[in-house]
Amino acid sequence: MSGSISKGKNDPTQSLQMIERPLMTPDELKTMPKGGFVVMKTGVHPMQVQLRLFLDWGIRFQRFQRRLSAR
């Protein structure tokens, strides 16, 4: 939510306006920098974090090989 408060010079009344918006718009999600992620977990507020990509951790996947002799 975003909003504004306005107060008149000679008038003691205040006006408050709030506008609801998504946490991040689709364009903001698309333009996140490389390594930027939105992490969501039940019971916890979503957070925007910077994480190293799995390749930088040294994680490698072996290619899938079907072994006909095992069947």
Image (cartoon, helix red, strand yellow):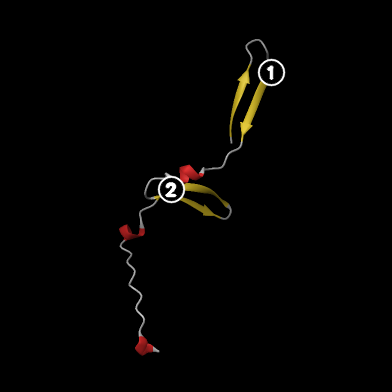
Q: Amino acid at mark 2?
A: Val
Measuring from the top left, give residue 12's x and y in whole percent: 68, 15
For marks 2 and 1 on the same chain, the one whose residue lies earlier in the sequence: 1
For the point 46% across and 46% down, the residue is 29
- Quadrant position of the C terminus in the picture: bottom left
For the point 31% across and 57% down, the residue is 56
Q: Amino acid at mark 1?
A: Thr
Task: Determine the secondary structure under disc 2.
Answer: strand
Quarter of the view holding residue 7: top right
The answer to whether residue 60 is left or right of residue 41 is left
Q: Say which residue label 2 marks.
A: 49
How crowded is the residue under tag 1: few (<14 C-alpha within 10 Å), some, or many (20+)?
Answer: few
Q: Say which residue label 1 marks.
A: 13
Measuring from the top left, give residue 11's x and y in whole percent: 68, 13
Measuring from the top left, give residue 30's x and y in whole percent: 44, 46
Task: Determine the secondary structure under disc 1.
Answer: loop
